[in-house]
Image (cartoon, rainbow, N blue to C red):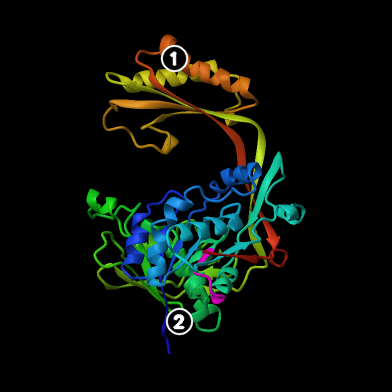
Amino acid sequence: MTSLACRLGSGAGFAGDRVDAAVRMVAAGEVDAIALECLAERTLLPALKMRAADPNAGYDPRLRRRLKPLLPVAHAQGCKVLSNLGQANPVAAGQAIARLASEEGVGGLRVAAIHGDDVMALADEIAWDRPIDGRLVGAHAYLGAMPLAQALDLGADVVVTGRVADSALFAAATVARLDVGEAAFAGALTVGHLLECSGQLSGGNFEPIGGQLLSAADYAGLGFPLAHVMSDGSAVVSLARGEPGRIDPQTCTLQLLYEVHDPSRYATPDLVLDFSAVSFETVGPNQVRVSGARSHGAPPTLKVAGYLERPGVVADMEIGFAGTRALERAQRAADVLRLRLGDWAASDLQIDLVGVNAVLKSGALPLQAPPAELRVHVSARCADLDAAQIVEDEVYALTLSGPAGGCCVRSERRARIEVLDGYIPASRVRTTIEWSTS
């Protein structure tokens, strides 16, 4: 007989996500566990740099701000907390969480730090998708749900990890009470995939077809989604009572297909999922039943995110134009830059107009009216700092030797870091648990 496995909440969908929605959900007693997904691929890079400079650093710098209001209410409600706030140093993060809990008067909190995702020492065994052209500064495998579920079974109140699959971070809280077999686990992982982007499931980043947008007040206070996950892996996803937002089959379909190349073979560290038979059924206001996920079994390899440091820097600049004939002046300024930077290889130089063609490029729709203001954007791969200075000087020169009214220049230099995908045999990745107690 199918039973309730877990009331599971989504507390964050990226490193800078809002804090208040998670606190409200937990304080209301709506969930047994809440997962905070805070680690995009790009987010791990600064953490690697921090850890290299200080062995006690390298976890999410927002950890205190995110968990300070959450830990006391989670402890009071008996709600488990799972997160990848550990970034490049989950052990140090676990120790920091225990200290924070003590400061907040939460005694006896058991924090489990899962580590083992750092596979830099196994770099020669990773099948990279292209040759390594530069200096490899980090390599982290995506962990699955089982190490996190084990920590919960051993009595963890908080589980903190580094690199882990988003769906696994959420599904881990359900594992102990799922029916035996891959079908239920596939369903729980699918629910995790739906919850992993917080407000994107509950009406954020969504424009209804022929319908109205949420109000500004609703967006400002948007409720995050939760799911009543059943032992067979099916679930009802919903909003907490009184929370603003929108959950329906459209928002669920949007999130189901997010970052998915082949819905019939979506590879996670735990299972290769088949979404082709997933169905969404409205069962109440902002309540949708999800079922039908299937599995093709466990994959033999785990995906690895590698971080490659390339020579040189990226120079990124903008200059603004406004007022009468702003579009014509901005287009002329862009043409001037193409002439002045004509020695740059086309693949190393990008010049476009923000507000006209910066995103859609040649596919941009014809303008209904000339914009009153816009910005010329320049991004250039530069061999060294001297080359970057040339690009910057050419943009600044437009203020005196270009079309009228060029102003408000923005300038930034970035290291050339690229994310490199690879795969490693799953059997080569070993995880361990380090415990801290408040």
Q: Tell me what residue is drawn at x 50 percent, y 79 percent.
A: 184
Q: Which sits in the foreground, 84 or 428?
A: 84
Residue 86 % position (x, y)? 56, 55
Amino acid type of the residue that numbered disc 1 sits on in the rendered structure: Leu
Residue span colored magenta:
153-159
Quarter of image, res 322? top left
Q: Are marks 1 and 2 in contact (CB under 8 Å)?
A: no
Whether 151 is among the magenta residues is no
User: Which residue is painted at 45% across and 81% down in the image?
Assistant: 231
Label 1: state its secondary structure: helix
In this rendering, position of residue 373 left or right of residue 171: left
Image height check: is 155 above or below 249?
Answer: below
Q: For the view shown, which residue lies furthest in the bottom direction?
A: 1
The kind of secondary structure element at disc 2 is: loop
Residue 27 in view in this figure: yes
Q: Nearer the viewer, residue 34 or 203?
A: 34
Residue 198 appears left or right of 317: left
In the picture of the structure, the residue carrying the numbered disc 1 is 398
Which one is in front in this view, the residue at disc 1 or the one at disc 2?
A: 2
In the depicted structure, whether residue 271 falls above or below residue 96: below
Binning the other alpha carbons within 10 Å of mark 1 as few (below 14), some (14 to 19) or many (20 upward) gives many
The residue lying toward the viewer, choosing from 356 and 144, is 144
**Which residue is label 2 attached to?**
231
Q: Position of residue 222 (x, y in %)?
A: 30, 56
Label placed on residue 257:
none
Dot placed on the residue nearer the N-terminal end, 1 or 2: 2
